[in-house]
Image: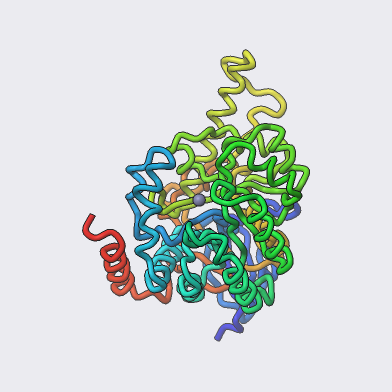
Amino acid sequence: MSDGRILLKNGTVVTLDPELGDISGGDVLINDGRIEQVGQEINAPGAEVVRADGMIVMPGLIDTHLHMWQHPLRGLGQHVWGFPDYSAHVFNLRERYGPQEMHDATYTCGLDALNNGTTTVLDFCHNVLTEEHAEGSLRAHRETGQRVLFAYGMLGRDDRLVEERPSRLAHVTRLAGELNTDKTNLVRLGLALTTLTYASIEDVRAEVEHARGLGLQMTIHQNVHAEVFRLHEAGLLSGDLLPVHSNNLTDAEIGLLASCGCAISFTAEGEHSDGHSMSVIGRADRAGVLPTLGVDAPSFTDPDMFAQLRATYNIMRATESQWERQEGRWPVRRYEGSPYVTSRRVLEYATVNAAKAIGLGDDLGTLTPGKQADIVMLNSGLFGIASGDPAYHILHYSTARDIDSVLVAGRFRKRAGRLLDVDFDKLAATAVGLRSRIIGDA
Ligand SMILES: [Zn+2]
């Protein structure tokens, strides 16, 4: 009989903790949901031993921007080329959702993301049409066992934005009282602010002040030029607010974000394929803004952070070489500080940085004793781990299909390549039924 502790044995442990580094032949001891010890040849009689031979053991990935309600709309984003298309082909379908559809979509998306190694997600839920819609999503989150910051969308129905705000904020207050009793609760509440494209700065101020009064993390879509200036002028920028996309930021705006301790969420595949400027993440990183990564919309992108890691690395390398050419340094050559972008740096975006950006830097993001045991075990396949930095193997020689196991708070959610506690026939039927209710046979 095991004493409840779990010992992951003999893996290549990529802790991302600067003190601990990478440990080959490394063990991770888990006790009561937390990491108790990391090192070689840990002796823990009574613990359940789980072999990690040939595997990379790494922190779970953290997605800082995912619209989980769009999971049944997979594929519809292929018709999107610019924001009007998105409104016409994807976002207009939001009114077809009731609370049950919100539950089912969130449930299928949560399992999809967990299966792909995402242990924590910021669910940017901009489809809270009624209180019951939010309750439907939250019910699903409690069922998947994923760690979630549920960013309650203030958008609501467009024509009732101002009129409904007080009752929506009252609902937020009630939910915060239930969910945010401890920062390591698996499902916690945050706020997704109305974008300045749809609301006045005073409306957004009312939301921010309410959230700050409750100690909630916030996030906001940032698409249109100069919105960061407006937020700063209004005194609203602070480290508890996570801007998303931010592709049009000037260097001056990036400087403001850095001085206010803000991170950004960069959603590589969606932004790239929709024609946005890609330089922001490299400029932000160099200026001291914490870059984090997100999938964005399952209507056009798979909830797979491994894909985002690789896309981000390649996009940043391409941008960096473009800057080198512009400076006359061509062909590119190595010098101190160049190349700037490394696989390890990008891996940190989706772990260390993301944990800090959602207010959980002390609890997540590295495999450090005392932190939550949110862990991915990655098979290295027939040919083993590639030479050099294991972070390079993670980004360039792995896909989500190589994931053997996923643990959240020390509990296996996926093991030996298969999600646990899931009725797969029922899950498939749920997904088919949901899709047919929302989009018919398209
Ligand atoms: Zn988004």
Image quarter where the N terminus lies is bottom right
- Extreme residue toward the bottom, this view: 1
Q: Is residue 292 left or right of residue 308?
A: right
Image quarter where the C terminus lies is bottom left
Quadrant of the rendered structure where residue 387 is? top right
- Extreme residue toward the right, this view: 259
Residue 7 in the image, given as x and y percentages of width and height:
60, 71
Residue 330 in the image, given as x and y percentages of width and height:
58, 15
**Residue 44 can be seen in this image:** no
Between 90 and 4, the one lying in front of the other is 90
Residue 105 in the image, given as x and y percentages of width and height:
39, 65
Between 125 and 164, the one lying in front of the other is 164
Q: Is residue 332 above or below residue 418?
A: above
Q: Is residue 119 above or below residue 249?
A: below
Q: Is residue 101 left or right of residue 67?
A: left
Residue at left offset 34%, top offset 48%: 89
Q: Is residue 138 left or right of residue 427?
A: right
Residue at left offset 58%, top offset 51%: 199
Quadrant of the rendered structure where residue 250 is? top right
Residue at left offset 64%, top offset 37%: 226
Q: How many marks?
A: 0
Residue at left offset 44%, top offset 50%: 399
Quadrant of the rendered structure where residue 149 is? bottom right
Residue 379 in the image, given as x and y percentages of width and height:
47, 56
